[in-house]
Image (spheres, grey):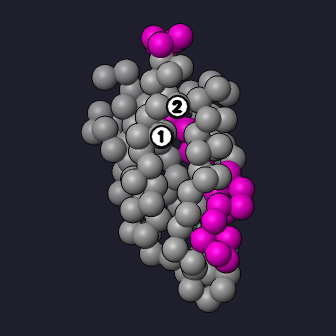
Amino acid sequence: WYGRKKSGAPPEGDGSVILIGALEKSQIDRVVKSHLAQIRFCYMKELQHNPSLEGKVVVKFVIGKDGSVSSAKVHATNLDNPVVENCICSRFMRYQFPKPRGNGIVIVTYPFYFHRG
């Protein structure tokens, strides 16, 4: 439903990571993957209203010095469904990542692929 085409999981290392502080991609993936049920919920809820809903949403988020997400927005999408896109971004604002090394921030773009099945 989301992730690499027809795989059901987000692609490993497919997000673009811009490091100002430092976090390993595996640390970012671990946190995002631990919350995939929330992301899936955003899609599945809207899929009930729009059974043909499919596409890709790329979320750009900033991990602050304390590991909290200071901003999350849609970087790119062809899903064209603001309900799902806003739901995903609001979920990201609740995530807690490890504190970046170097006392900086980390800017990440992370893709999600949604398919009906």
Location of mark 1 (residue)? 38
Instruction: Using the image, tell me which numbered label, if any, was put on residue 24.
Output: none
Q: Where in the figure is residue 60, as x and y percent of width and height?
A: 63, 53
For the N terminus, give its image quadrant. top left
Report the amino acid beneath label 2: Cys
Residue that lies at the very extreme toward the left in this rendered image: 7
Q: Is residue 110 above or below residue 89?
A: below
Report the amino acid beneath label 1: Gln
Quarter assignment of residue 106 = bottom right
| Residue 55 counted in the magenta span | yes
Q: Mark 1 and mark 2 in contact (Cβ < 8 Å)?
A: yes
Q: Is residue 76 above or below residue 97?
A: above
Q: Residue at x 56, y 86 (%)?
A: 101
Q: Residue at x 29, y 33 (%)?
A: 6
Tell me the crowding category of disc 1: few under 14, some 14 to 19, or many 20 or more residues within 10 angstroms, Cα based: some
The reply, left or right, for residue 96 in relation to residue 6 is right
Q: Secondary structure at mark 1?
A: helix
Q: Is residue 52 above or below residue 57?
A: above
Q: Which residues are magenta?
A: 48-72
The reply, left or right, for residue 100 in relation to residue 4 is right
Q: Residue at x 50, y 47 (%)?
A: 111
| Residue 65 counted in the magenta span | yes
Q: Secondary structure at mark 2?
A: helix
Q: Nearer the viewer, residue 94 or 49?
A: 94
Q: Where in the figure is residue 36, as x and y percent of width and height?
A: 42, 45
Q: Where in the figure is residue 81, as x and y percent of width and height?
A: 62, 24
Instruction: Using the image, tell me which numbered label, if any, was put on residue 42.
Output: 2
Q: Is residue 104 above or below residue 10?
A: below
Query: Can residue 112 be seen?
Result: yes
Quarter assignment of residue 86 = top right
Query: Can residue 109 be seen?
Result: no
Cα separation, mark 2 vs mark 1, equals 7 Å
